[in-house]
Image (tube, helix red, strand yellow):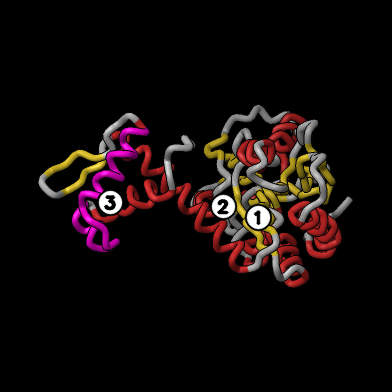
C-alpha cells in the first residue's frame, strides 16, 4: 500500500460508502464538511482516480471506487481483527485449511481439545479445493492443511500421513442397483464422480480403469454432498464419494454402499505444513502442538482403517 495513504483515508472512504453523503458522515464524525472533502480529495489524488461521482448531495461510487471499496474494506476488517486478537490477549491464531466433506469428526474433536489445552490461542478454519488449499499454504496464507489424494505435497512442504480414506460407491436403497452384482451395476448405472481436481478422483479413475469401464455415463462431477444426494435419490445412479462425507446418510439408511468386487479404493490423507527456518514463536509452537495432537485423534475417531 502506498505510504501516503493513511488509516483515516480508509475509514473516511468507507464511511462515505456506507452513508452515501458527505454531510451525514461529517455530522456523525463531528468534523466539518470541508475537512472531510479535503481528506477525500487527498485520497483521490494519491490514487489518481475519482472514487465518487456527485449527484446532488448523493455520493455514487465510480468504477475505480467500487474496486477500491473491496480492498479497503478487507484491509480495515483485517486490521480490526488484528486489534481484537491483540487486545483479547490471544497469543497466536492457527490458520487451518480443510478439504470439504471429509475428516470432519476428528478435526472437530482436535480443534476442541487444542483450544481447551491452549486457551489463549484461536483457530481460523477454512474449506476449499485441493488446489486452493495448496496455493494458500504456499503463499503462507494458511499455516497447515489437511489434504490428500494421489498427488504428493510439494517439495517445499512437510507432510505426515494421517490415514487412508475409503472411497465407496453408494446408491439409493430403494433402487435396483443395490441388488445387482457390482460389475453389472457399474455397467448399467449413471455415475457421479468427484471433480477432476478433487480429492479421490485419481483413485476413482484408476478403479474404473481396472474394472474396464469406459468412463461413459458420468452425469455429474461435484464435491457438494447435498446436490449429489438429491440426484442419487431421484435416479439410478452410483456415486463415488468419501465414506466420511456420507457416513450420516449411511447410518440413517438414506444411502447404501454398493460393494466392490475389487479391493476397496483408498486415498491417503496428509497433514501438510510449509517447511520453515524461522525461529520458534507462538504460532510455530501452536502448529507443532496441533500436528502432534491430530494423529492420535485421527486414529481414535476416523471411521476407517488407518496406516
- Quick check: marks 2 and 3 in contact, CB under 8 Å? no
Q: Is residue 169 visible?
A: no
Q: Quadrant of residue 285?
A: bottom right
Q: Does the magenta-highlighted stretch encompass residue 207?
A: no
Label 1 element class:
helix
Which residue is the site of mark 1?
245
Left or right: residue 42 versus residue 215 is left
N-term mark: 3 or 1: 3
> Where are the magenta residues, as a range?
22-46
**Magenta region, mostly helix, strand or loop?**
helix
How crowded is the residue under tag 1: few (<14 C-alpha within 10 Å), some, or many (20+)?
Answer: some
Residue at horizontal 13 percent and vertical 49 percent from the top = 57
Residue 249: image location, x then y, percent: 62, 62
Q: Find the distance from the CA under tag 2 to the CA under tag 3.
A: 42 Å
- Image coordinates for residue 168, horizontal then vertical, percent: 71, 48
Residue at 32% across, 39% down:
42
Kindly report which numbered mark, 2 or 3, lies closer to the viewer in this rendering. Answer: 3
Residue 65: image location, x then y, percent: 31, 39
Q: Secondary structure at mark 3?
A: helix
Q: Earlier in the sequence, mark 1 or mark 2?
A: 2
> Around disc 3, counting alpha carbons within 10 Å, would you say few (fewer than 14), some (14 to 19), or many (20 or more)?
many
Apparent side of residue 298 relative to residue 1 in the rendered image (left or right): right
Q: CA distance from mark 3 to mark 1?
A: 45 Å
Q: Secondary structure at mark 2?
A: helix
- Residue at mark 2: 225
User: Could you say which is closer to the camera, residue 253 or residue 289?
Assistant: 289
Sequence-earlier tag: 2 or 3: 3
Would you name the residue on which mark 3 appears? 16
Examine the image and state in which quarter residue 188 appears: top right
Query: Is residue 35 part of the magenta span, yes or no?
Result: yes
Amino acid at each position: 500500500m502506498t505510504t501516503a495513504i493513511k488509516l483515516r483515508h480508509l475509514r473516511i472512504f468507507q464511511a462515505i460508502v456506507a452513508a452515501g453523503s458527505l454531510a451525514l458522515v461529517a455530522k456523525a464524525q463531528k468534523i466539518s464538511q470541508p475537512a472531510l472533502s479535503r481528506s477525500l480529495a487527498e485520497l483521490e489524488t494519491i490514487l489518481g482516480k475519482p472514487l465518487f461521482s456527485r449527484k446532488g448531495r448523493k455520493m455514487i461510487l465510480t468504477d475505480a471506487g467500487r474496486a477500491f471499496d473491496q480492498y479497503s474494506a478487507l484491509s480495515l476488517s483485517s486490521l480490526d481483527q488484528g486489534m481484537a486478537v491483540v487486545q483479547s490477549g490471544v497469543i497466536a491464531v492457527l490458520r487451518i485449511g480443510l478439504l470439504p466433506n471429509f475428516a470432519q469428526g476428528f478435526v472437530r474433536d482436535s480443534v476442541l481439545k487444542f483450544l481447551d489445552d491452549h486457551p489463549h490461542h484461536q483457530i481460523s478454519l477454512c474449506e476449499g479445493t485441493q488446489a486452493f488449499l495448496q496455493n494458500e499454504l504456499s503463499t503462507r496464507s494458511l499455516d497447515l492443511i489437511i489434504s490428500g489424494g494421489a498427488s504428493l505435497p510439494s517439495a517445499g512442504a512437510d507432510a505426515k500421513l494421517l490415514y487412508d480414506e475409503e472411497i465407496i460407491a453408494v446408491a439409493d436403497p430403494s433402487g435396483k442397483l443395490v441388488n445387482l452384482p457390482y460389475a453389472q451395476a457399474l455397467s448399467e448405472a449413471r455415475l457421479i464422480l468427484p471433480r477432476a481436481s478433487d480429492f479421490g478422483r485419481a483413485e476413482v479413475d484408476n478403479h474404473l480403469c481396472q474394472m474396464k469401464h469406459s468412463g461413459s455415463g458420468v452425469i455429474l462431477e461435484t464435491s457438494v454432498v447435498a446436490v449429489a444426494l438429491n440426484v442419487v435419490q431421484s435416479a439410478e445412479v452410483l456415486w463415488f464419494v468419501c465414506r466420511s462425507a456420507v457416513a450420516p446418510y449411511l447410518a440413517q439408511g438414506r444411502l447404501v454402499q454398493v460393494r466392490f468386487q475389487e479391493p476397496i479404493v483408498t486415498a491417503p490423507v496428509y497433514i501438510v505444513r510449509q517447511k520453515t527456518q524461522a525461529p520458534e514463536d507462538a504460532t510455530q509452537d501452536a502448529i507443532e502442538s496441533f500436528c502432534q495432537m491430530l494423529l492420535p485423534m485421527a486414529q481414535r475417531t476416523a471411521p476407517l482403517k488407518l496406516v
